[in-house]
Amino acid sequence: MTIRHMKIFLEVYHTENITKAAEHMHMTQPAVTRTIQEIENYYGVKLFERINRHLYVTEIGKQLYKQALHIVDSFDNLEKTLRNGDTFGILRVGSSITLGNFVLPELVCRFREKHPKIKIYANVSNGSNLQKALLDNHIDLALVEGEVNEPDLITEPFYSDHLILILPPKHPLMQRKKIYLSDLSKYDLLLREKSSAGRIYIDNTFAVHGISINPIWESVSTQALIKAVSKGIGLSILPEMLVKDDIENGIICTKKIEDAAFARKNCIVWHKNKYFTKAAEDFRSLCKHFSDTKI
């Protein structure tokens, strides 16, 4: 099986359609079909089931996809290195929303000083989307808040942050000397969407304390949550970095939660089969040595 075979297989896998794959590869439909059949016949396997004119990938096809994706990527990176010595190129970086707002811009600026001719493509999204993008090789590495449990992804801790409780001014809880997690369950909560790293962390923290929560608002926008809290709609728990200016300006207030620190380690994440160019290694090194005093 050649690199060409693998590239055609990957295109068929992504499109789930021989005709579309042929168009994207600038090939004829019979040539694409023949390539898939060559792989299947040589190894005695079925990569796709053909049912009612639709392709369904088999289990062995899924296994080949995981390996072929990174073999092709490594080959492409090798060619780039041989042609230009890693002077030019693109680095694809993902980041969860909080880190994308406060950490990623500083990292990109530092990276550009060392690699001015390398372009950085950035994808700021929630943790679940970033993990899928890493698995599908759409990004090279990602900066993710909290934990990652996908077995094919490697994580390396970097940079700590805190989540804090935010309340509207004059909220009854502001008069309490001490606040506990159980107190919060008695009020309306406004939280990030379930697939976000911050929400997963919050849900797990409450679950460890045996507390069930049902937020009345869920939003992908932290600014929408802050605005809603300021209007007295409910309480929220958000990264300190995102809310400190609004607290200083008196738009919202904060109060310590006695039985939950809400401190977390963020991670640099990449696929276990990912080949890192020197530029990618340099970016990862910048992340590892990033100082929170620079925010």
Image (tube, grey):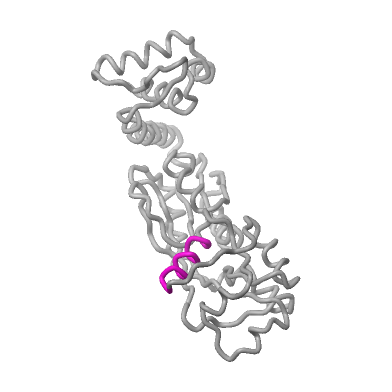
The answer, for residue 220, to whether it is visible in the render is: yes
Question: Can residue 295 be seen in this snapshot?
Answer: no
Q: Position of residue 282 (x, y in %)?
A: 44, 54
Residue drawn at 43 percent across, 57 percent down: 268
- Residue 83: quarter of image: top left
Q: Nearer the viewer, residue 190 or 255?
A: 190
Image coords of residue 200 (percent x, y): 48, 60
Q: Which residue occupies 51% across, 15% down?
A: 19
Which residues lie in the magenta part?
Answer: 198-209
Residue at figure coordinates x 65%, y 85% from the top left: 174
Please indicate whether residue 286 sits to the left or right of residue 45 in the image: right
Q: Is residue 255 above or below residue 153?
A: below
Q: Is residue 87 left or right of residue 2?
A: right
Q: Is residue 201 magenta?
A: yes
Prevalent SS, magenta region: helix
Instruction: Identify the residue at the far bottom of this view.
Output: 177
**Quadrant of the image occupied by residue 256:** bottom right
